[in-house]
Amino acid sequence: MELSNNTSLNAKFHQKNNKAYNLKQLEERMDKLKIESGFECSAKRVALAPKTVVNEPRVWHLDDFEMGNPLGEGRFGRVYMAREKDSKKIVAIKVIFKKEFRENNMIEQLKREVEIQSHLRHSNILRLYGYFHDKHRVFLVLEYAENGELYKNLQKDGPFTEHKAASYISQIAAALVYLQKKKVIHRDMKPENILLSSDGKIKISDFGWAIHTPDASQRRMTFCGTPDYLAPEMIKDMGYGQKIDAWALGVLCYEFLVGEPPFMVEDLRETYQKIATVDYKIPDQISLEAKDLISSLLQSDPEKRLPLDQVTTHPWILKNK
């Protein structure tokens, strides 16, 4: 697999505050997150822990990369900026600890995550270039998204303008349409799993809960994802299909414009109750066109939700192009 060079990113890699480290030094610098059993804490929301890694032929070795600064940390591993020595390509390397995955019976899910993401090719989906492993760790070589999590941008800047929100929703919808064609359900769409490239392009990431569904008529029953973004059919244990990603897109649209998800409250049971009854209110300052898109996606009946392939031609999206 060819990795192309990027001069500006290489310059950034060599900045004084982004020197190369060995992995042991990097791990010593990272503080351990306090994790509740079975849950991953992230800012003000609680995410059901993703489950999913690998024993296929190696493509690279750790010696093929110069390791840079840490980019983030999750329940089972960490992500670092890195540079592939031959091509000088800047990438992100996700380091996953095998022991934790074995202890939580997640090996098969990690294999599935890698299998799914490695076959995806879309401009708004984070590329998984490959993977390798040693005795204790699995390393995923990922596309580097320079501007980081959309969630952090949302927290820093507050609600997005309708123009920016429409641009993001249009790109996410295009990626979800592609996933539908590939018969993949993401199942954990949220701002923390959406990254931004250096030019502000959306990159959907973290396919830990993704599932390949060759038979579109088959109803899935696994309860997974992040509470604020779960669809009513999952809450009600009715079985679900690809349309849960359309529901999550409606939640994201609301959050981009308001600053928080529509069903978020302190009590988790109350959140589920609000989702099950579609109990939310759109603030008056939101435009009528945006309200229409949100309400057309946040339909309790999956069959009544706006099809994802119609989102990019919705009047609100076209108005804000």
Image (spheres, helix red, strand yellow):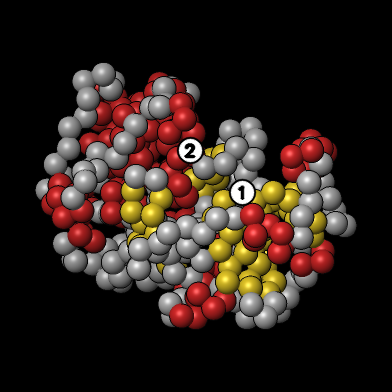
Q: In the figure, residue 170 lies in which quadrant?
A: top left
Q: Which of 252 and 181 is in front in this view?
A: 252
- What residue do we see at 33% from left, 48% from top? 45
Quarter containing the N terminus = bottom right
Q: Is residue 82 above or below residue 44?
A: below
- What residue do we see at 79% from left, 38% from top? 16
Q: Is residue 208 above or below residue 311?
A: below
Circle 1 — which element?
strand
- What residue do we see at 47% from left, 30% from top? 156
Q: In the figure, residue 50 lies in which quadrant?
A: bottom left
Query: Is residue 166 visible in this depiction of the protein?
Result: no
Query: x and y percent of residue 15 in the render?
Result: 79, 37
For label 1, the crowd category at 10 Å Cα-Cα, with few meaning under 14, some 14 to 19 and many 20 or more, is some
Q: Mark 1 points at which residue?
A: 71
Circle 2 — which element?
helix
- What residue do we see at 47% from left, 50% from top? 193
What is the three-letter code of the residue carrying label 1?
Leu
In the rendered picture of this protein, how many numbered marks are placed on residues?
2
Residue that protrudes farthest toward the right in the picture: 86
Disc 2 versus disc 1: distance between alpha carbons?
13 Å
Query: Is residue 278 visible in this depiction of the protein?
Result: yes
What is the three-letter code of the residue carrying label 2?
Lys
Query: x and y percent of residue 41 in the render?
Result: 38, 54
Q: Name the residue under label 2.
A: 152
Label disc, if present, on residue 187 of the rendered structure: none
Q: Is residue 188 above or below residue 217?
A: above
